[in-house]
Amino acid sequence: MFPIRDNIPSRSLAVITYGLIFFNFLIYFLTVSKLEGYILKYGFIPSVLIGSTGDNLYRIFSSMFLHGGLGHLLSNMIALWIFGDNVEDKLGKLKFLILYFGSGISGIILHFLFYPSSAIPAVGASACISGVIAGYLRYFPFARVDTLVFLGFFITHIQIPALFYIGFWFVTQIQGALISFVSGLAGGVGWYAHLGGFVFGFAFSSLFSKIR
Protein backbone atom coordinates (compact mmCIF):
# COMPACT_ATOMS: atom_id res chain seq x y z
CA MET A 1 0.00 0.00 0.00
CA PHE A 2 1.23 3.48 -0.89
CA PRO A 3 -0.43 6.64 0.51
CA ILE A 4 -0.92 9.62 -1.79
CA ARG A 5 -3.05 12.10 0.23
CA ASP A 6 -5.51 12.47 3.07
CA ASN A 7 -8.84 14.27 3.34
CA ILE A 8 -7.97 16.70 6.16
CA PRO A 9 -7.18 20.19 4.78
CA SER A 10 -4.54 22.32 6.47
CA ARG A 11 -5.78 25.35 8.36
CA SER A 12 -2.51 27.24 7.94
CA LEU A 13 0.71 27.07 5.96
CA ALA A 14 2.77 24.17 7.34
CA VAL A 15 6.06 26.07 7.32
CA ILE A 16 7.96 23.55 9.46
CA THR A 17 6.74 20.51 7.51
CA TYR A 18 7.57 22.02 4.13
CA GLY A 19 10.86 23.38 5.43
CA LEU A 20 11.91 19.93 6.64
CA ILE A 21 10.97 18.41 3.29
CA PHE A 22 12.99 21.06 1.43
CA PHE A 23 16.01 20.63 3.71
CA ASN A 24 15.98 16.84 3.38
CA PHE A 25 15.90 17.07 -0.41
CA LEU A 26 18.64 19.73 -0.37
CA ILE A 27 20.92 17.57 1.79
CA TYR A 28 20.33 14.57 -0.46
CA PHE A 29 21.24 16.38 -3.67
CA LEU A 30 24.28 17.97 -2.04
CA THR A 31 25.59 14.60 -0.85
CA VAL A 32 24.43 12.14 -3.52
CA SER A 33 27.66 12.37 -5.55
CA LYS A 34 29.67 11.01 -2.59
CA LEU A 35 26.81 9.46 -0.64
CA GLU A 36 28.70 6.48 0.77
CA GLY A 37 31.40 8.69 2.24
CA TYR A 38 28.88 11.03 3.84
CA ILE A 39 26.96 8.10 5.32
CA LEU A 40 30.14 6.72 6.89
CA LYS A 41 31.06 10.13 8.27
CA TYR A 42 27.64 11.39 9.38
CA GLY A 43 25.48 8.27 9.74
CA PHE A 44 24.70 6.85 13.16
CA ILE A 45 27.01 3.88 13.84
CA PRO A 46 26.41 2.34 17.30
CA SER A 47 29.87 0.76 17.61
CA VAL A 48 31.55 4.07 16.77
CA LEU A 49 29.50 5.87 19.42
CA ILE A 50 30.52 3.35 22.09
CA GLY A 51 34.20 3.77 21.29
CA SER A 52 34.10 7.57 21.28
CA THR A 53 34.39 10.15 24.03
CA GLY A 54 31.29 12.06 22.97
CA ASP A 55 32.78 13.64 19.87
CA ASN A 56 30.52 11.51 17.67
CA LEU A 57 27.23 12.61 19.22
CA TYR A 58 26.62 14.86 16.21
CA ARG A 59 25.80 11.67 14.29
CA ILE A 60 22.50 11.39 16.17
CA PHE A 61 21.26 14.51 14.39
CA SER A 62 23.18 14.38 11.12
CA SER A 63 21.93 10.85 10.42
CA MET A 64 18.33 12.14 10.38
CA PHE A 65 19.03 14.16 7.24
CA LEU A 66 20.86 11.50 5.25
CA HIS A 67 19.08 8.89 3.12
CA GLY A 68 20.42 5.75 1.51
CA GLY A 69 18.83 6.46 -1.87
CA LEU A 70 16.17 8.41 -3.69
CA GLY A 71 13.49 5.80 -2.97
CA HIS A 72 14.25 5.99 0.75
CA LEU A 73 14.04 9.77 0.66
CA LEU A 74 10.81 9.88 -1.36
CA SER A 75 8.96 7.40 0.83
CA ASN A 76 9.82 9.42 3.94
CA MET A 77 9.05 12.82 2.45
CA ILE A 78 5.73 11.73 0.94
CA ALA A 79 4.62 10.49 4.36
CA LEU A 80 5.77 13.76 5.95
CA TRP A 81 3.91 15.76 3.29
CA ILE A 82 0.67 13.79 3.80
CA PHE A 83 0.62 13.62 7.60
CA GLY A 84 2.89 16.40 8.80
CA ASP A 85 0.83 19.47 7.94
CA ASN A 86 -2.17 18.36 10.01
CA VAL A 87 -0.07 17.39 13.02
CA GLU A 88 1.73 20.73 12.79
CA ASP A 89 -1.68 22.44 12.69
CA LYS A 90 -2.72 20.63 15.83
CA LEU A 91 0.46 21.01 17.87
CA GLY A 92 1.81 24.31 16.65
CA LYS A 93 5.21 24.85 15.11
CA LEU A 94 7.48 24.60 18.16
CA LYS A 95 5.83 21.49 19.59
CA PHE A 96 5.83 19.92 16.14
CA LEU A 97 9.60 20.41 15.94
CA ILE A 98 9.98 18.81 19.37
CA LEU A 99 7.82 15.91 18.21
CA TYR A 100 9.88 15.49 15.04
CA PHE A 101 13.34 15.52 16.58
CA GLY A 102 12.25 13.85 19.81
CA SER A 103 10.92 10.94 17.77
CA GLY A 104 14.17 10.79 15.82
CA ILE A 105 16.28 10.72 18.97
CA SER A 106 14.03 8.13 20.63
CA GLY A 107 14.24 5.91 17.59
CA ILE A 108 18.01 6.11 17.49
CA ILE A 109 18.25 5.32 21.22
CA LEU A 110 16.09 2.20 20.83
CA HIS A 111 18.09 1.11 17.79
CA PHE A 112 21.28 1.59 19.80
CA LEU A 113 19.96 -0.44 22.74
CA PHE A 114 19.21 -3.42 20.51
CA TYR A 115 22.35 -3.20 18.36
CA PRO A 116 25.08 -1.50 20.44
CA SER A 117 27.90 -3.26 18.60
CA SER A 118 26.56 -2.78 15.07
CA ALA A 119 28.94 -1.24 12.57
CA ILE A 120 26.16 -0.64 10.02
CA PRO A 121 25.36 3.08 9.57
CA ALA A 122 21.76 4.00 10.31
CA VAL A 123 20.46 6.95 8.27
CA GLY A 124 17.16 8.52 7.38
CA ALA A 125 14.27 10.48 8.84
CA SER A 126 12.18 7.34 9.30
CA ALA A 127 12.05 7.54 13.11
CA CYS A 128 11.03 11.20 12.88
CA ILE A 129 8.32 10.37 10.34
CA SER A 130 7.13 7.48 12.51
CA GLY A 131 6.53 9.96 15.32
CA VAL A 132 4.60 12.26 12.98
CA ILE A 133 2.47 9.32 11.82
CA ALA A 134 1.77 8.44 15.46
CA GLY A 135 0.67 12.01 16.09
CA TYR A 136 -1.67 11.82 13.12
CA LEU A 137 -3.15 8.60 14.47
CA ARG A 138 -3.69 10.24 17.86
CA TYR A 139 -5.45 13.30 16.45
CA PHE A 140 -7.11 12.06 13.25
CA PRO A 141 -7.83 8.31 13.60
CA PHE A 142 -10.90 8.46 11.35
CA ALA A 143 -9.45 10.60 8.58
CA ARG A 144 -9.40 8.95 5.17
CA VAL A 145 -6.10 8.14 3.50
CA ASP A 146 -6.14 7.78 -0.29
CA THR A 147 -3.99 4.72 -0.96
CA LEU A 148 -2.65 2.92 -4.00
CA VAL A 149 -2.84 -0.84 -3.66
CA PHE A 150 -0.65 -2.99 -5.91
CA LEU A 151 -2.16 -6.35 -6.87
CA GLY A 152 0.42 -7.95 -9.11
CA PHE A 153 0.26 -6.06 -12.40
CA PHE A 154 -2.88 -4.20 -11.36
CA ILE A 155 -3.05 -0.99 -9.34
CA THR A 156 -6.22 0.10 -7.60
CA HIS A 157 -7.09 3.18 -5.57
CA ILE A 158 -8.99 3.00 -2.28
CA GLN A 159 -9.69 5.18 0.74
CA ILE A 160 -8.69 3.70 4.10
CA PRO A 161 -9.38 5.12 7.57
CA ALA A 162 -6.13 6.34 9.09
CA LEU A 163 -6.66 3.97 12.02
CA PHE A 164 -6.53 0.95 9.68
CA TYR A 165 -3.75 2.24 7.44
CA ILE A 166 -1.43 3.24 10.30
CA GLY A 167 -2.42 0.16 12.30
CA PHE A 168 -1.38 -2.08 9.39
CA TRP A 169 1.87 -0.14 9.05
CA PHE A 170 2.58 -0.51 12.78
CA VAL A 171 2.00 -4.28 12.67
CA THR A 172 4.51 -4.60 9.82
CA GLN A 173 7.08 -2.72 11.92
CA ILE A 174 6.59 -5.07 14.86
CA GLN A 175 6.85 -8.06 12.54
CA GLY A 176 10.08 -6.74 11.05
CA ALA A 177 11.49 -6.00 14.51
CA LEU A 178 10.71 -9.51 15.74
CA ILE A 179 12.32 -11.12 12.70
CA SER A 180 15.36 -8.89 13.15
CA PHE A 181 15.55 -9.79 16.86
CA VAL A 182 15.32 -13.53 16.21
CA SER A 183 17.95 -13.40 13.47
CA GLY A 184 20.20 -11.14 15.55
CA LEU A 185 20.97 -8.97 12.53
CA ALA A 186 20.47 -5.22 12.29
CA GLY A 187 19.72 -5.49 8.57
CA GLY A 188 18.99 -2.61 6.21
CA VAL A 189 15.79 -1.36 7.90
CA GLY A 190 15.78 0.28 11.33
CA TRP A 191 12.67 -1.44 12.67
CA TYR A 192 13.39 -0.49 16.27
CA ALA A 193 14.10 3.09 15.26
CA HIS A 194 10.64 3.20 13.68
CA LEU A 195 9.02 1.77 16.80
CA GLY A 196 10.92 4.08 19.12
CA GLY A 197 9.90 7.12 17.08
CA PHE A 198 6.28 5.97 16.95
CA VAL A 199 6.00 5.42 20.70
CA PHE A 200 7.50 8.84 21.47
CA GLY A 201 5.27 10.55 18.92
CA PHE A 202 2.11 8.97 20.26
CA ALA A 203 3.01 9.71 23.89
CA PHE A 204 3.97 13.31 23.11
CA SER A 205 0.78 13.92 21.12
CA SER A 206 -1.33 12.35 23.85
CA LEU A 207 0.26 14.58 26.48
CA PHE A 208 -0.73 17.79 24.71
CA SER A 209 -4.13 16.41 23.79
CA LYS A 210 -4.86 15.98 27.50
CA ILE A 211 -3.57 19.44 28.33
CA ARG A 212 -5.96 20.97 25.81
Image: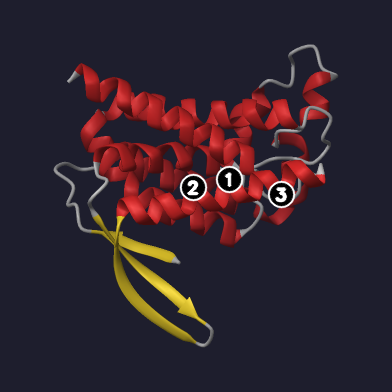
Which residue matches tag 2?
Answer: 170
Decide: few, some or many residues near mark 2? Use Cα within 10 Å; few <14, some 14-19, many ≥20. Answer: some
Q: Is residue 146 above or below residue 173?
A: below
Q: Using the numbered discs, state the Cα–Cα distance from disc 2 to disc 3 in whole angstroms.
A: 14 Å
Quarter where residue 174 is shown = top right
**Is residue 101 something one can see in this rendering?**
no
Quickly name the residue at label 1: 174
First reached walking from the N terminus: tag 3 or tag 1: 1
Kindly report the distance in space between the C-alpha atoms of the residues bearing marks 2 and 1.
6 Å
Q: Quadrant of residue 87?
A: top left
Point out the tag, 2 or 3, that comes first from the N-terminus. 2
Q: 23 or 204, which is in the foreground?
A: 204
Q: Residue at x 49, y 37 (%)?
A: 128
Which image quadrant: the C terminus? top left
Q: Is residue 68 left or right of residue 135?
A: right
Q: Residue 149 location, x and y as percent?
A: 42, 74
- The image's colour scheme reads secondary structure
Q: Looking at the image, is 68 positioned above or below residue 184?
A: below
Which residue is depicted at the point 35% across and 64% down? 4
Going by the numbered disc 2, the residue's amino acid type is Phe
Front position in the image: 164 or 94? 164
The numbered disc on residue 179 is 3
* Residue 86, quarter of the rendered image: top left
